[in-house]
Amino acid sequence: MMMSDILDRLGDGPAAAILGLLTGVVFGVAAQRSAFCLRAATVEFARGRMGERVTVWLLTVSTALVWVQAARLAGLFRPEDARILAVPGSWSGAVVGGLLFGVGMVLARGCSGRLLVLAATGNLRAVVSGLIFAVAAQMSLHGWLAPARDAIARLSITPGGRNVDLLAGLGVPDWGGLALGLGFAALALALARRNRVGPRILVFGAGVGFSVALGWVATSALAQMAFDPVSVTSVTFSGPSANTLMFFLEPSPELGFDIGLVPGVFLGAFCAAGWAGELRFQGFHAESQMQRSMIGAVLMGFGAMLAGGCAIGAGVTGGSVFAATSWLALVAMWAGAMATDLLLDQRGAAQAGANR
């Protein structure tokens, strides 16, 4: 009844934007308080540790799987209606885009979602990198980089005009996705106990995963009631960053879930940081750091649009509905990030130490 009242009073677009705003606030608060970051997790893992950052990432992924698959079993959400499964996926785009995104997030010292959260706390490096990411994403979608993105994506496309549902493709029973999520959650809790991760981090890390399920269920409910077609989607930062940028540049922009999501994340992270006393301006420490961050942001923008999602969009949101290209992109992101940390940061640190 509440959803129908919102639709009657505001219309489809504004209602979707409000849902995006609320989902974004939940994500922003949880991500800021848990310091959730795929880049930090991959770097930690690349250096031979399974510490707090890996724990938080695994907890977030497992929580998203559990909530989304539970909603599916309860009839609150149909994964087959999700936009990421309803359109063709690209195997080649997932591999190449995932690798580029992984390289870029290590260079920029944060994935696109993490940069948005940091920007809300006063980190000027994240503000600059986030804006460049949004511009590169828009250029990859409709601008100068679009032909290259399209050419790479067309090298290998999923069959049947849709993405591949891993659960259906492998013949896994309906409860299999929930069982896998619970298994990952058990592993995350075991790591949390070993690493002495406190309850606050655990709760907010799980909150990031919950926000993904919230987005899926909310947009699914809206799509069933709305007069105009509404995409069933959830938290991601490649398309929404580009769309939000254009919203402020176009003369007659349209509201939607994406337009509410990015401001919601910023607002949630800002309020969480303010409550914790963590609002402070931070800038680039050196020119080389600025150059590195800018290059990384461009790679992330192009890579995310090519891979069909960013570290959140593909790695958590797409993975929670078992879109095959999302899981492939996630593996490629880990590989690209770990290789970059090994070849650039770890080797550079070793050489600097040897020269002293």
Image (tube, helix red, strand yellow):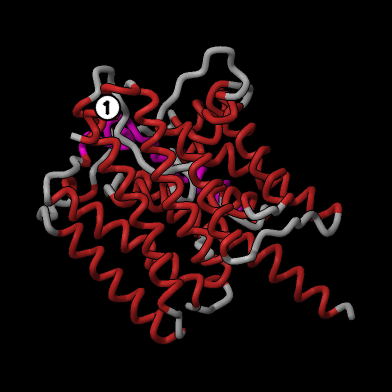
Q: Position of residue 225 (x, y in %)?
A: 20, 26
Neighbourhood count class around disc 1 (C-alpha, 10 Å): few under 14, some 14–19, many 20 upward: few
Q: Please tell me which residue lies in front, 46 or 137.
A: 137
Q: Residue at x 50, y 78 (%)?
A: 51
Q: Position of residue 227 (x, y in %)?
A: 24, 18
Task: Give the residue at the far right of this rendering.
Answer: 356
Q: Position of residue 154 (x, y in %)?
A: 43, 28
In the rendered view of the protein, which quadrant contains the C terminus?
bottom right
List the residue tagged with mark 1.
161
Q: In this picture, is 142 found above or below 210?
A: above
In the rendered view of the protein, which quadrant contains the N terminus?
top left
| Magenta highlight range | 80-105
Please indicate whether residue 6 sits to the left or right of residue 336 in the image.
left
Q: Residue at x 86, y 52 (%)?
A: 287
Q: Is residue 351 magenta?
A: no
Q: Please tell me which residue lies in front, 174 or 17.
A: 17
Q: Residue at x 54, y 36 (%)?
A: 241
Residue 61 visible to an observer of this rendering = yes
